[in-house]
Image (cartoon, rainbow, N blue to C red):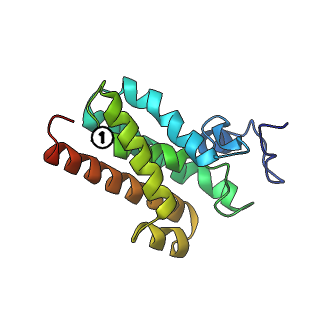
Amino acid sequence: MFLFRPLPDGLKRCDASVMAASVFGVGSFRWASGTAGSLAALPLALVLPGPWIKLAGAALAFALGMASIPKIEKVEHDSRIVVIDEVCGQLIALMAARNGNLPDFLAAFLLFRLFDIWKPWPARHFDRNVPGAFGVMMDDVVAGIFAALVLLGIHIVVPSW
């Protein structure tokens, strides 16, 4: 289909690992699958009240990623269909967003995407040097932490934001 990329040979859409790692197919979008994965975290963040519950959601996404990515890694390293890492990192970034505050959600989203694409150290280290599911997940965890810290800094510098 025009909107979705084909799965690598040996993977099936209905496989539980593929469903989890691709966040129910969101990672199969042909264009900007990472951005689509980050967007998939936004409605989840709206229903998860408070930063600690968002952290629990990120921990659950991390665990799902660690469990589901190895099967995909056997077929294709750091496959573009894997977006559970974006959900995890985006939830970490959204920990700094105040519930119901649209500018905070937008800033957390944009900051996470910036750090996820830029991959400053140590995110770049995890992305390039740490194999398997841990490396795939950790570069997004680091990007989420950086985004959250910048958003918290904005809250301190501009309290009325």
| Percent position of residue 60, x then y | 43, 41
Q: Quadrant of residue 48?
A: top left
Left or right position of 111 against 95: right
Residues 43 and 78: in front is 43
Secondary structure state at the residue bearing disc 1? loop
Left or right position of 146 against 10: left
The residue singled out by tag 1 in the image is: 95
In the picture shown, does residue 16 fall above or below 130? above
In the picture shown, does residue 117 fall above or below 160? below
Quadrant (top left, top right, bottom left, bottom right) of the C terminus: top left
* Residue at the extreme bottom: 129
Quadrant (top left, top right, bottom left, bottom right) of the N terminus: top right
Q: Residue at x 30, y 49 (%)?
A: 148
| Percent position of residue 3, x then y | 77, 37
Q: Residue at x 36, y 41 (%)?
A: 107
Identified by mark 1, the residue type is Met
| Percent position of residue 99, x then y | 28, 27
Residues 95 and 111: in front is 111
Q: Residue at x 63, y 43 (%)?
A: 22
